[in-house]
Amino acid sequence: MSIKLLIADDAPFIIQVTKSLIESRQIEVVGEAIDGEDAVKKALELKPDAIFMDMVMPNKNGVDATKEILAELPETKIIAVSTLDDEFMKEKALGAGCCDYIIKPFNRNDLIKSLEKVLGKEF
């Protein structure tokens, strides 16, 4: 059974890069969200196992979207993704309920290691 993954990022090219790095028989990208509001809507609709959540997005930031999603889907593993290598942002993300924090630019190994860490299984 594959892991269902939602990718939330306001940069379409980041979504495409992430998909190309991560999709496999074990990881299925079930949805894409272009802002925080879209991320909440799609998470509640698709019920993914994990979400790569950009922290800085229009309409609703990743921190607020994470809190909203986890209030309804507490088992969802949310991984914060940001260009900000900043302790304050990392603390806000983890405090909101994110399980890990990845800095852009990232590579396939970064993404896989984070999923393995938060889901407790190897890919």
Image: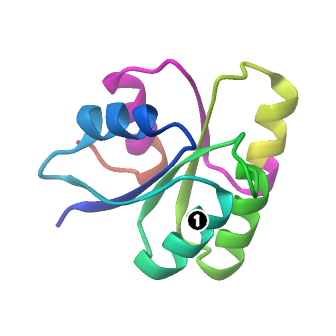
Q: Is residue 81 left or right of residue 59?
A: left
Please tell me which residue lies in front, 101 or 30.
Answer: 30
Residue 102 seen in the current view: yes
> Which residue appears at 72% of the width and 77% of the height?
71
> Which residue appears at 30% of the width and 41% of the height?
19
> Which residue appears at 45% of the width and 41% of the height?
117
Q: Which residues are magenta?
A: 95-116
Q: Quadrant of residue 59?
A: bottom right
Q: Amino acid at mark 1?
A: Asp
Residue 56, position in %: x, y?
Answer: 72, 39
Residue furthest to the right in view is 88
Position of residue 13 relative to residue 24, above or below, is above
Residue 36, position in %: x, y?
Answer: 66, 58
Residue 112 seen in the current view: no
Q: Is residue 23 left or right of residue 42?
A: left
Whether residue 86 is in magenta: the answer is: no
Position of residue 60 relative to residue 69, above or below, is above
Q: Quadrant of residue 5?
A: bottom left
Which quarter of the rendered picture does the C terminus lie within?
top left
Badge 1 element: helix
Position of residue 39 relative to residue 62, above or below, is below
Q: Number of labelled discs?
A: 1
Residue furthest to the left in view is 25
Label 1 Cα neighbours within 10 Å, binned few <14 / some 14-19 / many ≥20: some
Which quarter of the rendered picture does the N terminus lie within?
bottom left
Residue 104, position in %: x, y?
Answer: 55, 22
Please tell me which residue lies in front, 108 or 75.
Answer: 108
Residue under pointer 1: 38
Please tell me which residue lies in front, 57 or 94.
Answer: 57
> Which residue appears at 76% of the width and 33% of the height?
90
Whether residue 108 is in magenta: the answer is: yes
Residue 33, position in %: x, y?
Answer: 50, 57
